[in-house]
Image (cartoon, rainbow, N blue to C red):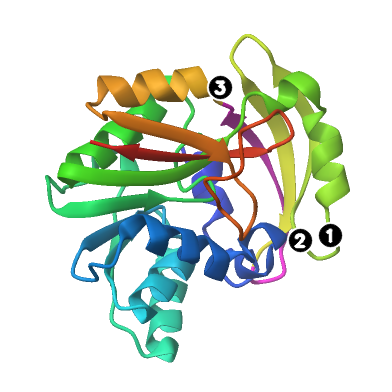
Amino acid sequence: MKQWYESLFENYAHKYDKECYVQGTVGECDFIEQEAGPDKSIKIIDIGCGTGRHSIELTKRGYSVTGVDLSESQLAWAREKAKEAGVKIDFKKHDARALPFKGEFDLAIMLCEGGFSLMETDEMNFEILKSAARALDDHGKFIFTTLNGLFPLFHSVKEFYESSAKEGNSACKDCSFDLVTFRDHNTVVFEDDAGNKKELKCNERYYVPSEITWLLKTLGYKKIDIFGAKLGAYSRNDKLTPEAFEMLVVAEK
């Protein structure tokens, strides 16, 4: 049986690129470039690359990027976009829980819930972090975003989704946040690329900073910094607060 995140991305690439939460690519890549440093010969893996927006922008800037995703339709559109942009990127279909790479990359990025936090169990989410750590070399850096568990302690997730809804974009309804599991259960309503209206029952895991720190420490990361994640404007100057819907994590081995 397909999981909701597999069904969601079956035929939802063109429409996905119009969603409001994927419009910050250039600013996000500015931050990645700062963190990556001046050496353009480093190898980057983009986990849960989706339609390839970060992979394409970083390749345009001179980096070597491998993009991996579970959705064939997302990857097909990513390849089309890369061709249009005149860049060559190795886009591969892989499950983020079992990446076949070992010590091959200097930097891993996993942005906009690129797999992590969408899995149906905490153990599966941890497999994604383990898989990313394995793909990095001994001095690798990992930059990712995830849902901020401090947010639903102070705010209604339901009200947040309602306030950020835009005509033509996907919408969430029937939200219920479980304080024991830190999972938000909701129904996502969207229209796929063929114009079919769909509803999917979803659940996503929110993480608090101390959990993320502990999970990454167990994987051998020595330096872990956590910030608030602002769409299109990632910055080390943004302290993580309950106002941030997402957190930005920068971990170094």
Q: Position of residue 95 (x, y in %)?
A: 32, 46
For this view, does 238 lie left or right of residue 249? right
Closer to the camera: disc 2 or disc 3?
3
Please report the residue visible at 54 percent of the width from the left and 70 percent of the height from the top.
26
Q: Where is 48 relative to 90, above or below? A: above
Label 2 Cα neighbours within 10 Å, binned few <14 / some 14-19 / many ≥20? some
Please indicate whether residue 161 sits to the left or right of residue 87 in the image: right
Quarter-wise, where is residue 180 in the image?
top right
Q: Position of residue 211 (x, y in %)?
A: 46, 18
Main secondary structure along the magenta-highlighted residues: strand
Start and end of the magenta stretch? 193-206
Q: Which residue is mark 1?
A: 166
Identify the residue at horizontal 38%, vertical 87% (top origin): 83
Residue 228's x, y, as percent?
Answer: 61, 40
| Dot 1 crowding, Cα within 10 Å, few <14, some 14–19, many 20+ | few
Near-viewer residue (89 or 64): 64
Q: CA distance from mark 1 to mark 3?
A: 28 Å
